[in-house]
Image: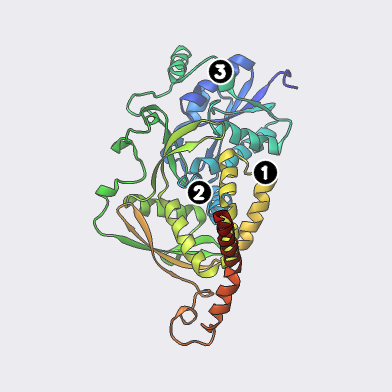
Amino acid sequence: MMNNPVKRVVLAYSGGLDTSVIIKWLIERYNCEVIAFSADIGQGAELAGLKEKAIKTGAKKIFIKDLREEFVKDFVFPMLRAASVYEGAYLLGTSIARPLIAKAQMDVAMAVKADAVSHGATGKGNDQVRFELTCYSIDPHIRVIAPWREWDMKGRADLVRYAATHGIPVPVTKAKPYSSDRNLFHISFEGGILEDPWAEPPADMYVITCSPEKAPAKPVYVEIGFEDGNPVSIDGKRLSPAKLLALLNEIGGAHGIGRVDMVESRYVGIKSRGVYETPGGTILHGARRAVESLTMDREVMHLRDSITPRYSELIYNGYWYSPERLVMQRLVDEATVGVTGVARMKLYKGSATVVGRKADKSLYHPDFATFEEDTVYDQKDAEGFIKINALRLKIKAMMDKGAGKGRGR
C-alpha cells in the first residue's frame, strides 16, 4: 500500500518555517495536492494571515478549525482531573494538544478523501509519536508522511536555504534562537540557546508571564469554583472552559505564575531541556487539590494518585487514545465525582498558594479532629488500633533480636 501514488495529502500546518517548506516539498516529492489544516487552540496572533500564507506557498486549500472550547473541556480538564504532572514538573501543555490536532486533521482527511496525512515533527522528538499514534488509532490503514524522516535536510539552515530557493515567504530572524509552541494551556520553548542546561533562559523570552521580580508588590486573591473536579467559575462568575482558562492565564501571568525550567526524558530515549509558561494550569492544579482535600475519600485519592505517574506518561508519550488511558480516565472521573467546592488562591510574585477552601459536602469537620471532647471518636480506641498495626513490626523486631543473639554465640 505504501507504494501507491499519493494524490492528496492533509498537512498539519502552523505557518512556520518547517510546514511552509513541507507544502512545497510534498508537491515536488509526491506530485500531489496539499490541503493545509490548522487548529485554533489558542495560539492567538500566530494564526493571523495563515490562510493567505498557505495558499501562496502552494496549498490547494486550508481548513482552520476553532477547537479552543473542545481543547479545554475534553482534553485539558480530564488531564487535570488526573492530577497529571510529568517528571514532577511538566503540566503537559504541548503533549495534550497533539491528540486533538491529529484527530481534527483526520476528520479533514476523511472529509476530503485524502490518501495521506503529514506533519512537521522531527524524527528526534515526541510529537511524531503523538501525531501518528492518534492517526493510526482512528484509521489503522492511513498513510503518514513525515518529511523529517525522508528528506536530506538536516536542520534549520537547510530549510532556510530551501525556502529562499523556492521563493517561500518565511520570516526568519536571529532575534529568537529557539523554537516555541503555544496553545491556550501553555507556551513552550526549546532548542537553540536553551540546549545548554546551565544557561539561564533570556529574560525577554517569556511571553505570557512577567518576571516574578517585576510582578506587583501586592498579592491578588482569586476564588475558583469546582463541580465534580472541573473548574466552572472565577470569583463567583461562571465561565466556559476556554474563557475560564484564558482569564486565569491573564491573571496568573501578571503575577509571574507558572514558569518551569526542566530537563525531561523524551519517549525516544533522548533528554531535552524545556522551558514552559503555564500560569492558568498551575493555579488550577493547586486549587483543585485544595478542594479534593476536603471532598475526596483518602483511599480513593491515594488510588487516583498512584496511577497519576503512569497516566501522565501515557499523555507525554502519545497514548491519549489507548485503551489503558481510557480505562484510567474512567477511574479518575469516578474519583472526582463530588469534588465540588471553592478554593481561594493567593497569587504573589511567582507563587500560587492555597489560602482557603470550602465545600458543602466536606469530609472535614473540626469536631472530628479537635482535641476537645467529642462523640464521634473515642481516644481510648487508638490503643487497640496502634497495637494491631504494630503487630508485624513487633514480630520483625523479635525475630531480628533473636537472630542477633544467635550470631553472637
Residue 379's disc is none
Disc number lying in front (2 or 3): 2
Question: Mark 1: few, some, or many residues within 10 Å (few <14, many ≥20)?
Answer: some
In the picture, measured across the screen, residue 262 lies left or right of residue 101, that is left
Question: Where in the figure is residue 330, as x and y percent of width and height?
Answer: 66, 56
Q: Nearer the viewer, residue 300 or 41?
A: 300
Label 3 and label 1: CA atoms lie apart by: 32 Å
Question: Where in the figure is residue 119, as x and y percent of width and height?
Answer: 57, 28
Residue 25's disc is 3
Q: Nearer the viewer, residue 76 or 197?
A: 197
Q: Secondary structure at mark 1?
A: loop
Question: Where in the figure is residue 280, as x and y percent of width and height?
Answer: 43, 52
Label 1 and label 2: CA atoms lie apart by: 19 Å
- First in sequence: mark 2 vs mark 3: 3
* Residue found 31% across the figure and 60% down from its top: 220
* Residue found 55% across the figure and 73% down from its top: 386
Residue 85's disc is 2
- First in sequence: mark 3 vs mark 1: 3
